[in-house]
Amino acid sequence: MARKPEGELRRGWTTGACATAATKAAYTALLTGAFPDPVTIRLPKGQTPAFALAVEELGGGHAMAGVVKDAGDDPDVTHGCLVKATVAPGAAGSGVVFAAGDGVGTVTREGLQIAAGEAAVNPVPRRMMSEAVQEVAAAHGGTGDVRIELSIPGGAEIAKDTLNGRLGILGGLSILGTTGVVIPYSCASWIHSIHRGIDVARAAGVRHVAGSTGSTSEAAVKALYDLDDQALLDMGDFAGGLLKYLREHPVERLTIAGGFGKLAKLAQGHLDLHSGKSRVDTGFLAQVLAELGAHDGVVGRARACDTGAQVLAVARELGLPLADVVAARAAAVAQETAGDAVRVDVLIFDREGGQIGSSRAVPLGG
């Protein structure tokens, strides 16, 4: 995750908001022959932003308009992308039909908010575009029966840096957004992907999922349990986003896998494991060493350490199972957050993917 800069940050617009603006401009041109530029839309919370058009085309029984996405100060992979909507008349009574064009994905698995076979356009953006179509139809005498093909040139390549492939969204990006507004560094799209990953796993009947803090721990836990890709959840720093959603949408078993430092934060009760949100308390780790029987000199040495890794090195020199206890305490925090319907265990791996700690080695909460 990119480091959040200091000072007040500028908000931006979701792909759903951009697609809505492009749709409204294109349908207006289809009915009137002229593109509104800028074009104003209404967002779910009542805001009415205006968007400048980057491209427009009218003729051949369709109209196309495009808006360049401005994500504000958020490190969004789609910042600067061109979001295009091509609107054509639909069959009488068909309503609004969505199609995936160049760079927009298609859903191929059950469990997501959109049915398999449909364009990867989430429910709120669908509603926003449908309402914009109704507004334009009422103003200019249209039927409101249209086909909207959405495209994001280059989206298929950008999608390789997202979790879409793992979710079964193939061919490009998703049109997302629940408010239309991008709040910088809220990481809403990452947390959204975690939730959708849980939905896909549940729909596929997966009983054991793994949430990992990084690629090394994910590869290690996948190999250890021979897990299918549908069982792998890229938790990253968002333990809370994973655990709270599982509380309402449980699976039978969850393994959390990660490095010592990240999971020491979870053991301390932190649910956001990012360095900007929480830090490893070496005093906490020193107290654990004391509980394991370390003498005062060792405990003092641990308290003076600057990092969790240094405390772990002290423990390993003495053969003290610090990583096991940290894993068990992290599992206790996770279990309480996820609820009793999910059986939780925690594994700690080193940078080479070797297992160094397990909650199963210590009584839960020990």
Image (cartoon, rainbow, N blue to C red):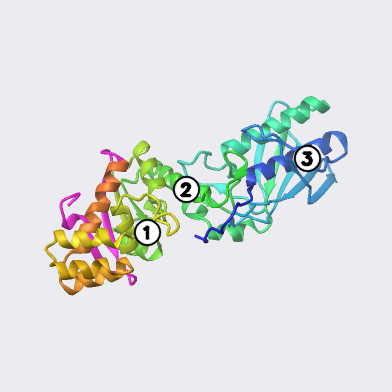
Q: Which mark is residue 191?
A: 2
Q: Are marks 3 and 2 in contact (CB under 8 Å)?
A: no
x%, y% of residue 75?
58, 57
Cα distance in 3D space between marks 3 and 2: 30 Å
Question: Looking at the picture, how far across and down is residue 87, in whole percent?
Answer: 75, 40
SS of the residue under disc 3: strand
Disc number lying in front (1 or 2): 1
- 53 relative position to 33: left or right: left
The residue located at (54%, 52%) in the rendering is 185
Q: Is residue 234 magenta?
A: no
In the rendered image of this protein, does residue 332 appear above or below residue 217?
Answer: above
Residue numbers of the magenta segment: 339-366
Residue at 72 percent of width and 36 percent of height: 41
Q: In terms of secondary structure, where does tag 2 sit?
A: helix
**Which amino acid does the dot numbered 1 rest on?**
Arg
Estimate the spatial distance between the alpha carbons at disc 1 and disc 2, rounded to whole Å: 21 Å
Return the residue at label 1. Answer: 279
Q: Earlier in the sequence, mark 3 or mark 1?
A: 3
Residues under labels 3 and 1: Cα distance?
Answer: 45 Å
